[in-house]
Image (tube, rainbow, N blue to C red):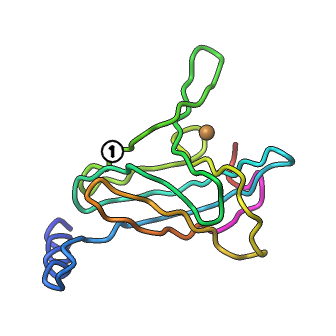
Amino acid sequence: MKRLIAAIALGLSACGQGAAPLTIADAQYRPPLGASGIGVAYFSVTSPVADRIVGLSSPQADRVEAHASVVEGTQVSMKHLATVELPAGKPVVFGPNGMHLMVYAPKGIAEGATFPIQIELESGRSETIWFHPTSSGAVGR
Ligand SMILES: [Cu+2]
């Protein structure tokens, strides 16, 4: 597997881009519940090289933030993460009760349409990820 990733990375740098793409899985977007005006997005991201998420945005929302759920006793609160580490080759999972993306004041999307969120990386790369909408409650809390 390591050899395959190295081969892919070499192939891409030969094209002059010098940047291997992120591997994205399970990209799901949950529109706001009721009048909260805040949507949530979950996904799993693997970077072939060590990198760091330093910015999040969407043309379809006022603001997008990465949050971590923090459990203190019986209370669960959320902490805004300014950056998220992406270790080389290791999946970083955003999911219910863990890290997640909060989408503030999203615009409505057509039924079945995907929701775009752009990730900026410390390496200077940026990628748009398309999240598939799920009905509320389908992906847990
Ligand atoms: Cu949050």
**Residue segment shown in magenta:** 132-138
**Helix, strand or loop: magenta stretch:** loop
Vertical placement of residue 132 versus 139, above or below: below
Vertical placement of residue 38 versus 49, above or below: above
Asked if residue 130 lies left or right of residue 29, the reply is left
Identify the residue at the far top of this view: 73
Vertical placement of residue 19 versus 68, above or below: below
**Could you say where residue 50 lies in the image, as x and y percent from the top left?**
23, 53
**In front: 139, or 51?**
51
| Residue at image coords 29%, 61% | 124
Indicate yes or no: mark 1 CB to ligand 1 under 8 Å.
no
Classed neighbour count for the residue bearing mark 1: other residues with Cα under 10 Å, few (<14), some (14–19), many (≥20):
some
Q: How many marks?
A: 1
| Residue at image coords 47%, 65% | 25
Magenta-drawn stretch contains 42 = no
Magenta-drawn stretch contains 133 = yes
Quarter of image, res 31: bottom right
Q: Quadrant of the N terminus?
A: bottom left
The residue singled out by tag 1 in the image is: 85
Q: Amino acid at mark 1?
A: Glu
Q: Secondary structure at mark 1?
A: strand
Quarter of image, res 134: bottom right
Vertical placement of residue 95 versus 117, above or below: above
Q: Quadrant of the C terminus?
A: top right
Identify the residue at the far right of this view: 34
| Residue at image coords 57%, 17% | 72
Quarter of image, res 11: bottom left
**Could you say where residue 140 lies in the image, as x and y percent from the top left?**
69, 47
